Image (cartoon, grey):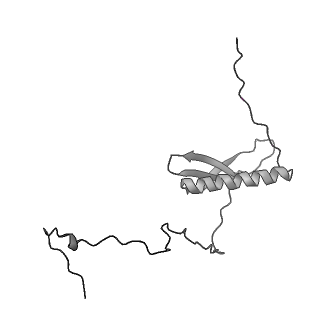
Amino acid sequence: MAEPTSSKGNSSPAAAPAPAAPAAGAPTERQPASIRYLDQADMAETFADSITGLMFDGQTLRIEFGVTRFDEVKPNTQITGRRYPACRLVLPPAAAVELINRMQQIAAALTQAGVVKATPRATIAEPAKS
């Protein structure tokens, strides 16, 4: 049997349903989502040999990757070529932070393996006191 509903203008306290109290032992916070990674083996891959643009507008990180195509090489002439956009990747801030963290981990591993050399960070000299 359904509970009676109040009509417009009826301000009877019995007409308003009471807020549901959480069940004893029930968590009050929502559990994080459980997300499974499913690979797509037939997904297209994009080759890039340069980063032609990088911009953060406060809402998204935009990275444009480029690919270089060289013109026909002729003897005694300068090598020429063109760079084309290959892919534009747009990430929300959380994914941008994840990318930065993972790239720092890769940089540390490459430095430890001796593949790249760590460059000392420039320090700003304090002004001389008089």
User: Per the image, is 74 magenta?
Assistant: no
Q: Position of residue 81 (x, y in %)?
A: 69, 48
Q: Position of residue 43 (x, y in %)?
A: 63, 71
Q: Which residues are magenta?
A: 118-123
- Residue 89 visible from this viewpoint: no
Looking at the rendered image, the quarter that the N terminus falls into is bottom left
Q: Position of residue 91 (x, y in %)?
A: 56, 56
- Residue 118 visible from this viewpoint: yes
In the figure, is residue 119 to the left or right of 11?
Answer: right
- The residue under the point 63% across, 56% down is 98
- The residue under the point 79% across, 39% down is 119
- For this rendering, which residue is in front, 130 or 23? 23
35 versus 103 height, above or below: below
Most prominent secondary structure in the magenta stretch? loop
85 versus 45 height, above or below: above
- The residue under the point 81% across, 43% down is 118
126 versus 86 height, above or below: above
In the figure, is residue 114 to the left or right of 14?
Answer: right
Q: Position of residue 89 (x, y in %)?
A: 58, 56
Find the residue positioned furthest to the right: 114
- For this rendering, which residue is in front, 21 or 73? 21
